[in-house]
Amino acid sequence: MIQKTLFDFERKEEQVIAVDWAIKKPIVVFDGERIETFESLYKFSDSVSSEILCEEGVPRSLFTIDKTIKLIPGAIVKKKRKELDLEKSDENDAKIIYWLYHENPDFF
């Protein structure tokens, strides 16, 4: 069963979430506090109510919602992961995307 708790609470002043996506793996979402997973991009996009931050290459056609999607090149995410000496994981990449947006929104 998919949990939608990430989107069940009232947001603070900003409404952005970072997404690490894959076609054949769960979608990993980070809101600055919590990690949440969804079994598919379709399930995720049906429940989101925030601006979306993703790596370039996300299939926009799968999003069935009318929300802003901001993209960042994967090379920037990879470089930051190396700088932070973090293991490659969906959770880490979602966090890095979120942090990069707050450090330098011009990347998006």
Image (cartoon, rainbow, N blue to C red):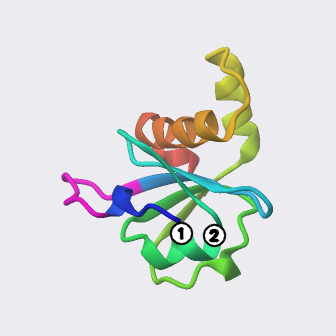
Q: Is residue 90 left or right of residue 44?
A: right
What is the secondary structure assignment of the residue under circle 1?
helix
Please tell me which residue is depicted at 19% across the width and 52% down the height of the picture: 12
Residue 22 located within the stretch drawn in magenta = no
Quarter where residue 80 is shown: top right
Residue occupying the far front of the picture: 1
Q: Amino acid at mark 1?
A: Phe
Q: Measured along the vertical axis of the image, is residue 62 above or below residue 95?
A: below
Q: Nearer the viewer, residue 43 or 80?
A: 43
What x and y, as percent, mark residue 66? 46, 83
- Crowding around mark 1 (Cα neighbors within 10 Å: few <14, some 14 to 19, many 20+) is many
Q: Are marks 2 and 1 in contact (CB under 8 Å)?
A: yes
What x and y, as percent, mark residue 74? 73, 45
What x and y, as percent, mark residue 37? 55, 54
Give the Cα distance between marks 2 and 1.
5 Å
Total numbered labels: 2
Where are the magenta residues, as a range?
8-16
Please tell me which residue is depicted at 19% across the width and 60% down the height of the picture: 10
Q: Amino acid at mark 2?
A: Leu
Q: Measured along the vertical axis of the image, is residue 1 above or below residue 21?
A: below
Q: Nearer the viewer, residue 108 or 87?
A: 87
Give the number of the disc on residue 41: 2
- Crowding around mark 2 (Cα neighbors within 10 Å: few <14, some 14 to 19, many 20+) is many
What x and y, as percent, mark residue 18? 51, 51
Residue 14 located within the stretch drawn in magenta = yes
Please tell me which residue is depicted at 67% across the width and 56% down the height of the picture: 26
Give the number of the disc on residue 44: 1
Please tell me which residue is depicted at 67% across the width and 79% down the height of the picture: 62
